[in-house]
Image (tube, grey):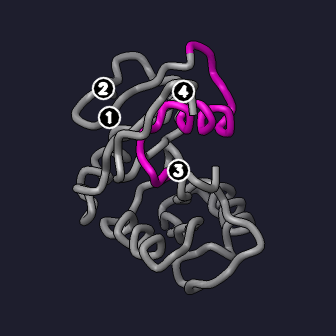
Amino acid sequence: MAQGAKLTCMQVSIIIPSLYSPIINTVLVQLERQSSRDQIGEVLVVGKASMGQKLNRGKVRYVDTNIPVSTSRARNIGIRQARCEILYFLDGDCLPQVDCLEQHLRAHSAGHVLVGGGVLMPIDENYWNLTYNLAIFHEFLSDQGTGARNYLPGLNLTVARSVV
């Protein structure tokens, strides 16, 4: 956290690394539809936006990195600016299901400090993208059930700030 920054929020800071995501506004609409949207303290979109995209609205704050940065660097910038106790990392091309945040928070309430979310693959995606995503994320598909994993992808992940 930046020196002198104070935690002011016991809710969730959602950190979205985004590099010209063509669907970032759809991602933000999906967050507004969350069953636990009242638990969202802030949404930080970190990176570069396409011309004309209006990202500062409501709880959403756009953090322009001036130059394109890696996903991990954008997440670290978001961590330093976030004010809440739970950090939710969501990629700029991931559309969370309506109860996604609720499920993450339920797991945190049960004592977990790190929670990875499942992944649904879009049916209409092109063959090569689908093949790549299945190869990378097969262990994290929503139908694989809950349980411990050797690693978790950062595309749909919550973590207690005390762990960071």
In the image, residue 128 above or below residue 63: below
Q: 145 or 40, which lies in front?
A: 40
On residue 47, the disc is 4
Distance from the alpha carbon under mark 3 to that under mark 4: 14 Å
Q: Residue beneath label 1, please?
A: 60
Left or right: 114 as drawn, with respect to 104: right
At mark 4, the secondary structure is strand
Q: Amino acid at mark 1?
A: Val
Q: Earlier in the sequence, mark 4 or mark 1?
A: 4
Circles 1 and 2: CB atoms closer than 8 Å: yes
Q: CA distance from mark 3 to mark 2?
A: 18 Å
| Marks 3 and 2, the one that precedes in the sequence | 2
Q: CA distance from mark 3 to mark 1?
A: 14 Å
Task: For the residues labelled 3 and 2, say whether their Cβ atoms are less than 8 Å apart.
Answer: no
Q: Is 79 drawn above or below residue 114 in the view shown?
A: above
Cα–Cα gap, marks 2 and 4: 13 Å
Is residue 70 located in the magenta-colored stretch of the structure? yes
* Residue ID for mark 2: 56
The amino acid at mark 4 is: Gly
**In this picture, which residue range is highlighted in magenta?**
66-90
